Image (cartoon, rainbow, N blue to C red):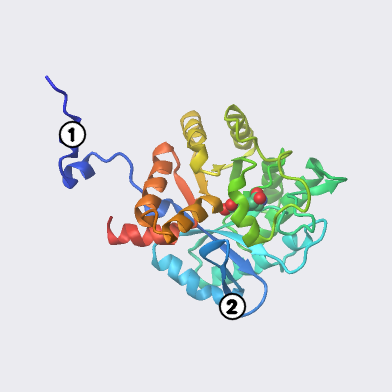
């Protein structure tokens, strides 16, 4: 007798009845770029459809995001001034700190996650303090923790260290706890690869390294056992959520992490992944909506509980409107 799996594909009601994975608006985190200045809402040339906002232009955007049902954003700041120690990153009146206060004023329910790193704020563009041309791990930890504390003071709900220094989660956790922020969670960029997929982001955030690359701190794309070791360390040190980044070329890593640890896993659908889709759909080569939903569903199927994506607003519209 022929076995007939096609029976369960017969019509849309049956297909939806047996569907294993569903993308929800609650799964999505939308990245947002804030910039110094006034009256600025400028489209980012490397990330079509994404904008740099000055603080006075945030209100409409935050309201739109929450109207769409998205409850979490990931905040990136572009400072006016850079120096070797990223002092704008931990200044209590820095761009992200002021944005946090403004966003919480507009909508205190919005869950605000902040990227914790030095690269946008250093004049050399590396993610830490330099010793010669080497990024000094242990010196950097003090700064990373200081940035996280200053974001927590300004109202961050979660901090997301993306620097890939060893020991950063415990440094952040202990400084936050010491200062009464034991309820601020840590979403760790645990397995962050040295990837070419960050190109459009670096143009958007003006954060490309001035010399060399990030291979001495970000992971080798060829490794996945190492990702498990990184995840394990971050969990031991107190991470609440672990992240894999980029997402698309690393879904095997997402799956291994999800199956090995019973913790929430986030996947970052990064700038290069977004830009490729945007460019191909502008050229009429692909159907943007179908492709994006297929890719994000794939991330979910691989094991991601949370997806950080520049497509989040579009996806929220598409899901609400029905597929
Ligand atoms: C900062 C940071 C980067 C991204 C997020 N945080 C860039 C980098 O590591 O060079 C990339 C995000 C994206 O490509 O969408 N360290």
Number of other residues with Cα within 10 Å of mark 2, as a class: few under 14, some 14 to 19, many 20 or more: some
Q: Residue, x 61% and y 67% (percent of image)?
A: 34
Pointer 2: what residue? Answer: 56
Number of other residues with Cα within 10 Å of mark 1, as a class: few under 14, some 14 to 19, many 20 or more: few
Where residue 174 sits in the image (x, y, percent)?
A: 70, 45
Residue 239 higher or lower than 125, as above or below = above
Where residue 291 sits in the image (x, y, percent)?
A: 38, 50
Residue 292 higher or lower than 263, as above or below = below
Q: Residue, x 67% and y 42% (percent of image)?
A: 169
Query: Mark 2 or mark 1, which is nearer the start of the sequence?
Result: 1
- Give the label on residue 283, or none: none
Q: What whole-number distance in Å separates the C-alpha atoms at marks 1 and 2?
A: 55 Å
Q: As drawn, which residue projects farthest toward the left?
A: 1
Q: Could you tell me which quadrant the N terminus lies in?
A: top left
Where residue 131 sits in the image (x, y, percent)?
A: 86, 45
Left-right relation of 30 to 190: left
Residue 159 higher or lower than 299, as above or below = below
Q: As drawn, which residue projects farthest toward the bottom?
A: 39
Where residue 99 sits in the image (x, y, percent)?
A: 61, 68
Pointer 1: what residue? Answer: 6
Observer-nearest residue: 28 or 219? 219
Which numbered disc, 1 or 2, marks the residue closer to the eye?
A: 1
Q: Is mark 1 within 8 Å of ligand 1?
A: no
Say which element carries label 1. Answer: helix
Tell me if label 1 and label 2 are in contact, CB under 8 Å.
no
Say which element carries label 2. Answer: helix
């Amino acid at each position: 007798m022929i076995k007939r799996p096609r029976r369960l594909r017969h019509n849309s009601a049956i297909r939806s009845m047996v569907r294993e994975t569903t993308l929800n608006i609650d799964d999505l985190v939308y990245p947002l770029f804030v910039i110094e200045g006034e009256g600025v809402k400028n489209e980012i040339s490397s990330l079509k459809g994404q904008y740099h906002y000055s603080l006075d232009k945030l209100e409409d955007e935050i309201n739109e995001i929450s109207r769409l049902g998205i409850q979490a954003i990931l905040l990136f700041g572009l400072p006016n001034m850079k120096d070797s120690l990223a002092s704008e990153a931990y200044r209590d009146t820095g761009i992200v700190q002021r944005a946090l206060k403004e966003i919480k004023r507009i909508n205190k329910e919005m869950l605000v996650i902040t990227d914790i790193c030095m690269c946008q704020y250093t004049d050399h563009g590396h993610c830490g303090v330099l010793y010669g041309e080497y990024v000094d791990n242990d010196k950097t930890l003090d700064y990373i923790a200081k940035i996280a504390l200053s974001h927590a003071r300004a109202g961050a709900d979660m901090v997301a260290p993306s620097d890939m220094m060893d020991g950063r989660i415990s440094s952040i956790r202990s400084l936050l706890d010491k200062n009464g922020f034991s309820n601020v969670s840590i979403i760790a960029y645990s397995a962050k690869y040295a990837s070419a997929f960050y190109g459009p982001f670096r143009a958007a955030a003006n954060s490309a390294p001035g010399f060399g690359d990030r291979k001495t701190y970000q992971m080798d794309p060829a490794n996945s056992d190492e990702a498990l070791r990184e995840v394990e360390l971050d969990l031991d040190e107190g991470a609440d959520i672990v992240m894999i980044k980029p997402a698309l070329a690393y879904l095997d890593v997402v799956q291994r992490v999800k199956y090995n640890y019973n913790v929430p896993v986030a996947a970052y659908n990064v700038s290069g992944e977004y830009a490729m889709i945007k460019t191909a759909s502008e050229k009429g080569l692909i159907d943007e909506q179908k492709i994006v939903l297929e890719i994000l569903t794939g991330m979910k199927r691989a094991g991601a509980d949370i997806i950080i994506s520049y497509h989040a607003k579009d996806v929220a519209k598409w899901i609400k409107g029905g597929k």
